[in-house]
Image (spheres, grey):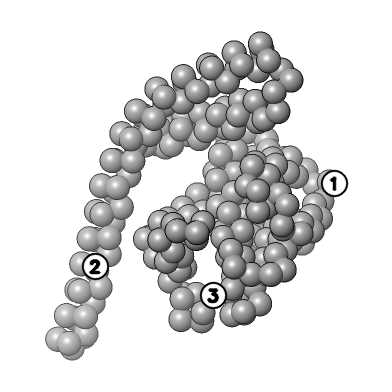
Amino acid sequence: MSNVRLIDETRRLYSQVVQSERMASVGIVAAGIVHNLKNYLTAIQGFAELLAHNHPDIVGVEEIVIASGKMDHMIADILAKSRQRKTAEEVDLNTLIRRELDFLLADAVFKYEVEKDICLAEDLSPIECVYTDFSQAIGNLLHNALDAMHDRDPKKIAVTMARQDEHIEVAISDTGCGIAPKDLERLFEPFFTTKLGTGEEDEPVGTGLGLYMAKRLLEPYKVKMKVESVVGEGTTFRLEIPLKV
């Protein structure tokens, strides 16, 4: 190996080590923050359940109880992963996707302005996984699809699921702005984002962690994630989930 190639390879490996250390530090800090957030979430859950019990006629209270319960499970899962422990269960992907879509109804744009084309596969057997791994990943993809259509018209999200040979394919499509070819190869890099809004006028603001986390959460299950996008037309994310994960 020439000296130039050796130097380039050393720089590449050094960059990977720095990135790994950076993400490890972020993970430690995040675990600490999540642990503290659990205390406040407990209060939200308690008051929401009390309100639901005393005033069951109030619209939206039950959704608060369900959402806070989901957050509690996510926090427990994050903390378990920080200790390298997690519990798998049999999960019905149809139910999971429907719940994620129901949670999005809290967004007025999604509820009133987005055309929804949902075609699930009711005859599929459950898969064994950590529920929050898939709910977070699919939830992130759905939120990304919604954000991509911020200033687009018409707005349409299509979610399809079907068995393909030895895997289940879940496809999430939008009619958003699309992704430039130069950005496709960087989509799953941590902290890379194409959402450069400032938060004004409800513009989406990206952290650059949504797709990164989705990919990392699904990697242990050997899920393949594919992206098809045309600038100005929209994007489709396809998940190929092995039947035996």
Q: Where 229 falls versus 25 (above or below)?
A: below
Question: Residue 19 sits in which quadrant?
Answer: bottom left
Instruction: Give the residue at x 44% y 57%.
Output: 199
Q: Residues within 10 Å of mark 3 (few under 14, many from 20)?
A: many
Real-space CA distance between mark 2 and mark 3, rounded to the nearest whole angstrom: 26 Å
Residue 129 visible in the snapshot: no
- Tell me which amino acid carries mark 1: Asp
- Tell me which amino acid carries mark 2: Ser
Using the image, tell me which numbered label, if any, was put on residue 15.
2
Q: Secondary structure at mark 2?
A: helix
Instruction: Give the residue at x 60% y 38%.
Output: 131
Q: Give the mark nearer the N terminus: 1 vs 3.
A: 1
Asked whether the beta carbons under mark 2 and mark 1 sit within 8 Å of each other, the answer is no
Residue 143 place in picture, x, y as percent: 58, 54
Question: Residue 119 sits in which quadrant?
Answer: bottom right
Q: Is residue 128 left or right of residue 26?
A: right
Q: Secondary structure at mark 3?
A: loop
Instruction: Return the residue at label 1.
Output: 123
Using the image, tell me which numbered label, if any, was put on residue 179.
3
Residue 120 place in picture, x, y as percent: 80, 52
Q: Where 227 falls versus 206 (above or below)?
A: below
Residue 99 place in picture, x, y as percent: 69, 40
